[in-house]
Amino acid sequence: MGSGKTTIGRILSKKLNKDFYDSDYVVEEKTGVKVPLIFEYEGEVGFRKREESVLKDLVYLKNIVLATGGGVILSQNNRELLKKNGYVIYLKSNCEDLAARMVDDKSRPLLQKGDLKQTLNNLFKFRDPLYEDISDQIIDTKNKRASEITSEIESLLIKL
């Protein structure tokens, strides 16, 4: 959530000449509404069901770069799908950087209540081990521009 998955994914897909998909955007395209509205009417559980359905389709596409929503790894099924069907790169950010990026972001339903930094800390403590478990590669994003992160990923992929 807020680590730069969509930004990096778009840049990387252009450099690698691959199609780019963002699972949150695909959910929005299929439903015709934005993610916050899905959360409002269906709650997180409803959104996660839609997210899993979309992911099941996306992981089987070839020659793509896929960015997922931050909570995609909460589902064991999603973790298995990602691990079995792709090369997973975890863009790891610290909570302070995430909070600075998202302080005015109203598009993230889970961050609209309570203290932003505390909420991010709680999400990070739970999600970080899940990301680390399924990741083929972990990229620390601290003090790096999108272009630096993209170049780092490119050099890793060349070695595969």
Image (tube, rainbow, N blue to C red):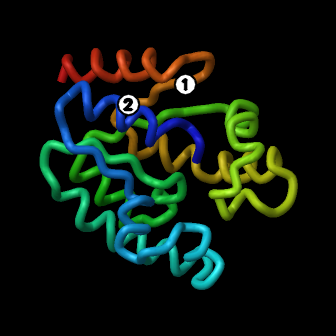
Secondary structure state at the residue bearing disc 1: loop
Identify which residue, 61 or 139, lies in the foreground: 61
Name the spot of residue 89 as percent of width and height, x first.
Answer: 38, 36
Q: Which residue lies under the disc numbered 1?
A: 141
Question: At label 1, which amino acid type do we have?
Answer: Thr
Q: Residue at x 72, y 37 (%)?
A: 95
Q: Residue at x 48, y 45 (%)?
A: 131
Secondary structure state at the residue bearing disc 2: strand
Question: Quarter-wise, where is residue 9 in the image?
Answer: top left
Question: At label 2, which amino acid type do we have?
Answer: Gln
Name the spot of residue 117 as percent of width and height, x first.
Answer: 81, 44
Q: Residue at x 38, y 52 (%)?
A: 22
Identify which residue, 44 or 127, lies in the foreground: 44
Instruction: Establish if 53 lies above or below 125.
Output: below
Name the spot of residue 140 as percent of width and height, x first.
Answer: 53, 24
The quadrant of the rendering that contains the C terminus is: top left
Instruction: Establish if 74 lies above or below 9.
Output: below
Q: Which residue lies under the disc numbered 2?
A: 137
